[in-house]
Image (cartoon, rainbow, N blue to C red):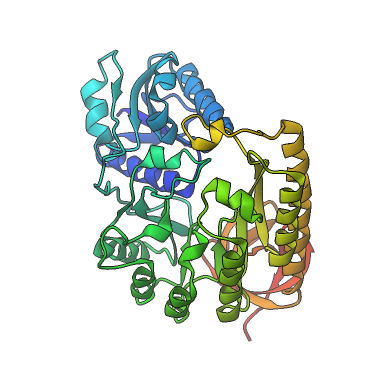
Amino acid sequence: MKKVAFYTLGCKVNQYETEAMIELFQNAGYEICDFDEFADIYVINTCTVTGMSDRKSRQIIRRAKKKNENAYVVVTGCYAQVSPDEIKKIDGVNLVLGTKGRENIVDICNEHLSASSIVEESDIMHTHHFENLQIKDFSGRTRAFIKVQEGCNQFCSYCIIPYARGPIRSRELSEVLEETKRLSGAGFTEVIYVGIHIASYGLDRKSFDLADLLIEANKISGIKRIRLSSIEPMTLNTEFVEKISGVSKLCHHFHLSLQSGCDETLKRMNRRYTTEQYLSIVEGLRHHFPDVAITTDVMVGFPGETEEEFNKTCEFLRKISFSGAHIFPYSQRKGTPADTYPNQVSANDKSKRSHIAMDICNETQKEFMQRFLNCTMEVLFEQRNGKYFEGKTNNYQNVLVKTDEDLSGKYMNVLLKEIKNDSFIGEIIKEN
């Protein structure tokens, strides 16, 4: 039996696609093994969000060949799509697949295993077909990802992803609900709907949208929690939030990408909203979901960002008071408009600003967590973490409970007694 190993970099969409490819190989009779083991085929699912992502992808590609110099190495994902020529230069790469054609990956590999030439699948920009990769199970997990959408039409000035993923394509609503039911039948009680630009779900179909999906999924027996991956803020307008406010299984956590708290910077980024509009969205969510956790992404050091503009971002971060944030420096991406913008910010200034913004968000995160001290919340436990068992609340707060018991997949009421780093230390409330 031939062995195949996988390595995934990047986002939850990539994780979903890797799981789907694993099932395709399993169904074809391959044995799945760990990436550090000897395998006949190595599949690296790459990311290209930043230059660091590209470097990490190249490192992993080279690592595969060291495990088995005769292995067949497949490179797929976003980096493979936008920079196939760079990947071709890496010794030992046999197949560059990009972000389309993964549903046929087994057939492509079997056809070319004896060939020395590299096969390349490309032209994602004219693709309007949703690649229907499916998953029946997630090994070793309590939560299941379901990919519902592909592509992005936003073209933010710093972002390479629209060129890596192509135009928006939505999965048929009935197919998403069917996979949700199937995963519920496999024992999963929490699902996370993911996409490259999930806010665009249904826009290309016009007969359904994201709110329709949430409302219908809420009716599925066995599902207790529904989460959304990162979502663009303008989707969550008053009409949308009122429509989903009755979705009882929807988790009260929204990751709303901000990028900058300065209107001038947002305009150069081509982000298509203002800080005032963003604030209105946040206030609407907090009105309908009082315990809601709002997390975000913030990019510092975008070209032309002055000290005054950065200070506006800092003020806005304090005003919103996020429950968590990913702070990162701007990274030049060849092929994007911002790559050629004047007034690039120095690495030293980007580093300083990252630390300042992170300090602000760490403080607001602590303030948010303080609200729930000595409260009892339901926790879905996922995995062991040393002497503790770890899980998440409905609003995505991490909880640790000291126990020898295996709590995997169990929902339990927990008294949140202490804050330690970014987690709560809790005590299970025993039923009488």
> Which residue corresponds to the image point at 38% horizontal and 44% vertical from the top-left?
17
- Whether residue 393 is visible, yes or no, is no
Please indicate whether residue 337 sits to the left or right of residue 294 in the image: left
- Of residues 236 and 182, the one nearer the viewer is 236
Q: Is residue 64 above or below residue 287?
A: above
The total of numbered circles placed on residues is 0
- Of residues 136 and 177, the one nearer the viewer is 177
Q: Is residue 239 above or below residue 213?
A: below
- Of residues 377 and 10, the one nearer the viewer is 10
Please indicate whether residue 107 sits to the left or right of residue 81 in the image: left
- Whether residue 104 is visible, yes or no, is yes
Please indicate whether residue 192 sits to the left or right of residue 421 in the image: left
Q: Quadrant of residue 390?
A: bottom right
Q: Residue furthest bottom?
A: 432
Q: Position of residue 303 (x, y in %)?
A: 63, 38
Q: Is residue 103 above or below residue 357?
A: above
Q: Position of residue 90 (x, y in %)?
A: 45, 16
> Which residue corresponds to the image point at 27% horizontal and 27% vertical from the top-left?
109
Q: Position of residue 285 (x, y in %)?
A: 56, 74
Which image quarter holds the C terminus?
bottom right
> Which residue corresponds to the image point at 55% horizontal and 80% vertical from the top-left?
288
Q: Position of residue 193 (x, y in %)?
A: 42, 60
Which image quarter holds the N terminus?
top left
Please indicate whether residue 15 sits to the left or right of residue 302 in the image: left
